[in-house]
Each structure stands twice: as structure tokens, then as C-alpha cells.
Amino acid sequence: MTAFTIGGQLVLSRNKLARSKWEAKREKAPLMSGTIHFTSLVMKIPLRRHEVNPNDPYQKSIFQWKNEFVAACGEFVGTTMFLMFAFGGCNIANLNTSSNSTSSGNSSSVNATADAGKLIYISLSFGFSLAINVWAFFRISGGLFNPAVSLALALAGAIPPIRMITLTIAQILGGIVAAAIVDVLTPGGLAVTTTLVPGMSISRGLFLEMFLTAQLVFVILMLAAEKNKSTFIAPIGIGLALFVAELWGVYYTGGSLNPARSFGPAVAGRSFVGYHWIYWVGPFLGSLLATGFYKFVKWLDYKSVVAGQDASSEAEVEREKARHDPEAAGAAQDGRDGDH
């Protein structure tokens, strides 16, 4: 292949028929900078062509499945890391310790009086572990780590259905692996299963899990799915949301809010309670509740209520208000003109 210039433009000599087919596909591709590699030299020129043609069905399929694979791998590792450190802290709090030995404990044997220090320790373990790992993995997979969150983002249109399915599978597998690692590495056994406190009915446990999950999911939707100037610190708010929810939930239900969090220890410990289903149904109902409210306030155009929240200057605030309420902005402008 040779290259020469005509009128300052780069021309490549090649078979006319092959060139026409090749160029027809390249011209449909999105524009971006590229590099042309010749036999004897490399030239950086502003071709503004995409290396992958999204109009080619084969290339498009390969590109899509590559992305799904990367996201699933990131979500599996991220969920494993999140739950492994959360389970590790929870295991320490739940195991009965003495000065000489550590014996096996069980989260189902909850005292009649709540141990505030223990509850805070568990809540901090989950909240901080979530915040740190979301911050680390959100560029790879989104850092969801929860099938209920995956469902919410799919319903909100933030991720496609196929991504929701692959991430959910990765999250469940990550929960199992995390529980197995803690079980193997921690003397005294695994003490992180989610069970109801004595006196807590199944229906109460179901609805408590629903409302706690709704709180977490709504925070995720507003801070991460709804892009704004604070999105870059969304992991802090998400971790705090889980921490607050765990403060209430740990004592009564074990504080699941996540099917993968409950299913993993149940599989690793080979112990399923008869009401295990509430740790699936409750979080998914909470996800539906939070997503429904999120879509409702978006439909009502909530940004027009307190306009300019993300503005960095008075001028931006005025422009935002004008976009949502032209009449009020016009009246304000008339008032300023009258002052002059």
C-alpha cells in the first residue's frame, strides 16, 4: 500500500472495489481520532474514524459482549471484596470471644437487649466496605453489588436488561465466594447469616427489609443515576445510606437489603431458614418502591422546584430558573430593567 497527497489531502492507493466497500463502512462509523499504520512508517493524522464499525453486526456483537464480560468480571470481584470485608467485620462482632478462645456464634441468637456497640460495628463494616468498593469499581461495572440495585437501574433505564442479568449473576456468585473465603479464613466458623430476632414476625421482617432497601436504592438513584455535581462523591452518600439502614435492620432481620448478602452465607454455611425468601422479596419490593417514586418525581420535573442546585454562579441559577419557569424569569428581568 502506498500513500501520496493531492491538494494537501492524504490518498491511499488500493483496489477500487475493495476500497469502496471498506470506505462505505468506515464513513458510517462515529468520528474520533485514529492512527494509520503503514508498512514502513506510522503517521498520526486526524482521520476522525472509529476503529470499530458499530454498523457491522459482527463487530457490534463482539464489542457488546466484550463490554458485558468486563462489567460482569468487575461486578463479581467488587461484590466479593465488598461482602468479604463486611462479613469479616460482622463475623468478629457475632462470635463470642474470651481472653483464651473464640467459639462459634450465630447471628440468629440475638439477645433480648440489643448490643449497641456490636450493632454499630456491623453497620460500619457494611457501610464503609460498600463506600470504598463502590468508589473503586464504579468505573468498571458501576459498582452495584446488589441484585435489587441492578433491578432499579434497569427499570430507571440506566442499564440495559442484559446488563442487569449478567451483573445479577456475578453479584450472587460474588456473595457465595465472599462467604466461603470468610468461612475458611476465620477461626470459629461463619456467623453472618441473616435471621429474624425472636418475636419478629415474617411479615414485619419482609416489610422492614422492603423499606430499608428502598432507602438505599433511592439514594443510589438520586446520587449516581441522576447525574449532578455531587455524583463524584456518591459512594460516600451510598455508604452512609447503608450504614443508617443497618443500624435499624441488623438487630431485627440481620440487615440484608441485598439478596446476594443473604444467599452467599446460606450457601457457604449450608443453612437456609424457612423464611429465607423474605431476603429476596423484601429487597426487590423496596427496589420497585424506590424506582417508582424516583420516576414519579422526575415526571413532575422536580428540578423546577428548587432550580439551580448545581449552579456555580448567580447567572447559572437565573438561567436554570428561566428554563423551568420562563414567566417568573421574565418578571424578574422586567423588575431589573425597571430599576435601571
Image (cartoon, rainbow, N blue to C red):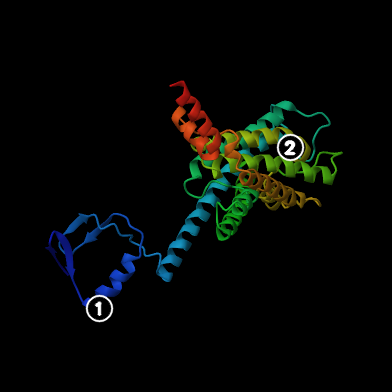
Q: Where is residue 335 drawn, in percent x and y?
A: 50, 26
Q: Where is residue 321 drawn, in percent x and y?
A: 52, 35
Mark yes or no: residue 165 visible.
Answer: yes
Q: What amino acid is found at the position of numbered circle 1 in the picture?
A: Leu
Q: Residue furthest right?
A: 199
The N terminus sits in image quarter? bottom left
> Residue at left 69%, top 36%?
245
Between residue 276 and residue 105, name the one nearer to us: 276
Left or right of 19? Residue 190 is right
Q: What amino acid is found at the position of numbered circle 2 in the picture?
A: Gly
Left or right of 30? Residue 180 is right
- SS of the residue at dot 2? helix
Q: Earlier in the sequence, mark 1 or mark 2?
A: 1
Between residue 253 and residue 106, name the one nearer to us: 253
Looking at the rendered image, the disc whose residue lies closer to the viewer, 1 or 2, is 1
User: Mark 1–mark 2 contact, CB under 8 Å?
Assistant: no
> Residue at left 48%, top 30%?
333
Q: Quadrant of residue 191?
A: top right
Residue under label 1, please give it. 17
Q: Where is residue 139 drawn, in percent x and y?
A: 47, 46
Label count reads: 2
Residue 249 shows which numbered tag?
A: 2
Circle 2 crowding by C-alpha within 10 Å: few under 14, some 14–19, many from 20 = many
Q: CA distance from mark 1 to mark 2?
A: 68 Å
Q: Is residue 102 above or below residue 147?
A: above
Q: Residue furthest bottom?
A: 17
Q: Where is residue 298 drawn, in percent x and y?
A: 61, 45
